[in-house]
Image (cartoon, rainbow, N blue to C red):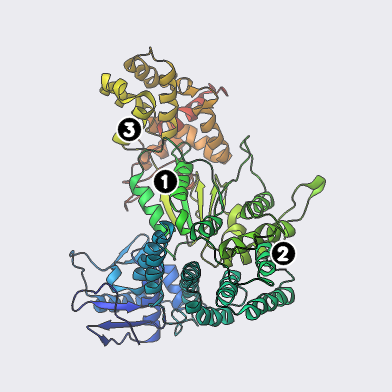
Amino acid sequence: MIRPPARPAPAGAVYFSLLGPLTAVRDGRPLPLGPRKQRLVLATLLARPNTPVPVDVLTDAVWPDDPPRTARKNLQVYVSAARALLGSTGDDGRDRVVHGCGGYRLTIDEGELDTLRFRSLARAGRAAGERGDLRTAARLLREALDLWEGPPLNDLRDSTGVAEEAERLEARCLTVYEDWAETEIELGRAAVAVDGLRDLVERHPLRERLRVAWMNSLHQSGRQAEALAVYDDYRQLLARELGLEPSPAMAALYRAMLGRGRTARPAAAGREAAHGTALPAAPRDFTGRREELRELLALLGSPDERVVVVSGPAGSGKSALALRAAHLLGDGFPDGRFHVQVRREDGSDRTPAEVLGELGRLCGVGVPGGSGVPAESTVSAASAVTAASAATAQAVVPAGPEGGPAAVSQGAADAWQRWLSLHRALFVLDDVPDEAFVRGLLPRSGPSSVVLTVRGQLAGLAPVHRIALGALADGEALELLAKLIGPGRLRTDPAAALRIVRACGALPLAVGVGGMRLAVLRHLPLAEYADRLGDPSAALDELVAGDISVRLRMASGWQDLSADDRRALGRLAGPAQEGGFTLAGAMEALGCGERAAIRTVESLIGAGAVTSPAGEVTAHAALYEVPRLLCLYAREREEGRFSPG
């Protein structure tokens, strides 16, 4: 049976369901969805609502092995059928399905799609739980689960692409079920969850958090022998299938249950134990980036986005944005939020094995291996599964010469992917050098998410969502400067303050360094400092505050470029300083033909050194730009004026 949406759609609107077989109803009547290939296209678009779906993804969903020559034309026919089903325009008059450079985007509201309603209810339920309102949390989470009709898209899973989308949806449903069950246990109503947990454990026997919740629910219901048997069965299964033991926390729960009556734990203590966090302090002077932050939070809250790439030139605030989002998303990732710096302090790259080893250690923070749990408490399921991570990852990362990590073994990679498939955690991998470095670290399945910060584009990673950071808007840059020098001082000469932030290229790093310098040099008039920064030969010398140097940050980005890109950027820096350059200007500066110039400019775009227009425009009409401070640094290198200070 298809349940109507909890928030009714307007009369005549279509309501789609993915949390079971793909279905659609209008005014309570089922709608025919056409032949199988048409339904595959519709399911793929609906699985990524309000997000561009690349044509290649749609093609792979319909023809995974050998697409015909007419594949794109056939897709257009199937998309047209989806438009007809939805209605060509929404309430706001905009097209419901549009095609752009990112692919096809289907616009749909919460009241028209069960997965959107599910996500909204789950978020509200978790928020209520964090406030300590467990009854409201249980009710909202149950409402979300009532939308779950069975394995998502179970009628289309013979398509590999749709099966991957369905697995993501099912992982999200399982996590919400675990949230609901744990909440009911904390309320002392464990009996309502017992049967459902048993059925889910039978379908997902290796999911430890489900097992822990089932043990707790049986124990609290007075069925101690059955609770202990759940642990014994799981221990034997792990040993037989994976050669592993249950996590230390789950083993401690088992010992605590032996010979003891029903116990309960205060809700707050359990929820605090469920969150492992290893993040640097939130950036105190984070300013602006409101749209980008809103987009990043929405993506990380979506069950459809595992990997988000935040790109931008050196000093654009990529790390600050990623960390700000991570600090705001505590309730969305009960198995932890973790930050790993991919490069060493000297700018050299770490090895993937080193990073994987650190990830393994971080995931076990706060869970001592083999330690017991107070006898009068019930162990948090999330803390139980988190406890296994350190032992798993550390055990499989082999030691290299002199105790250092060797290359990541296949066993290490497989164990890491098993952990990711069973947990909902957030990872920020900061300052990634290239695609090859992170491919083995990214989740292939499960509900965990990763944010990658990178100067280039990581064009070889797909499918990922990308957020590109450029300069701050004038108002945002002035807001940041005012935080550092005080709004009163900024108001003494707002025109000079505007010149300062523009001379800094409106990059957060440079504006921050300039503000810190002015905060120390209280006697220095803003107009005089603006004049210094306006001098191309002196600007980088002025952007130093203590041990923080903008020039050194530019140098680090410069070293990431290939030798050919460095030579080209040095030659393009001159015309770029004059307000940007066209393809004709690039041909003249580089002394080459059109095709060679296009390849060079696009290589610099991929490396994050050149920016291009956001909209579609021909190569001849485009105006390309280089961040001002990178231009100044490139001119220094070209003219031999470089100094490392």
* Among numbered discs 2 and 3, the one appearing first in the sequence: 2
The spot of residue 94 in percent (x, y) is: 21, 64
Q: From the viewer's perspective, is 392 left or right of 585?
A: right
Find disc 3 in the rendering and name its residue. Answer: 479
Q: Are marks 2 and 3 in contact (CB under 8 Å)?
A: no
Q: Nearer the viewer, residue 171 or 226?
A: 226
Amino acid residing under circle 2: Gly
- Residue that numbered label 2 is attached to: 411
Q: Could you say which is closer to the camera, residue 545 or residue 132?
A: 132
Residue that carries the numbered disc 1 in the rendered image: 594
Question: Mark 3 falls on what kind of element?
Answer: helix
From the top left corner, tell me how far across and down residue 286 is, in percent.
Answer: 41, 38
User: What's the CA distance linking mark 3 and mark 1?
Assistant: 42 Å
The quadrant in which residue 372 appears is: bottom right
Q: Where's the C terminus, which quadrant? A: top right
Categorize mark 1 by other alpha carbons within 10 Å: few (<14), some (14-19), many (20+).
some
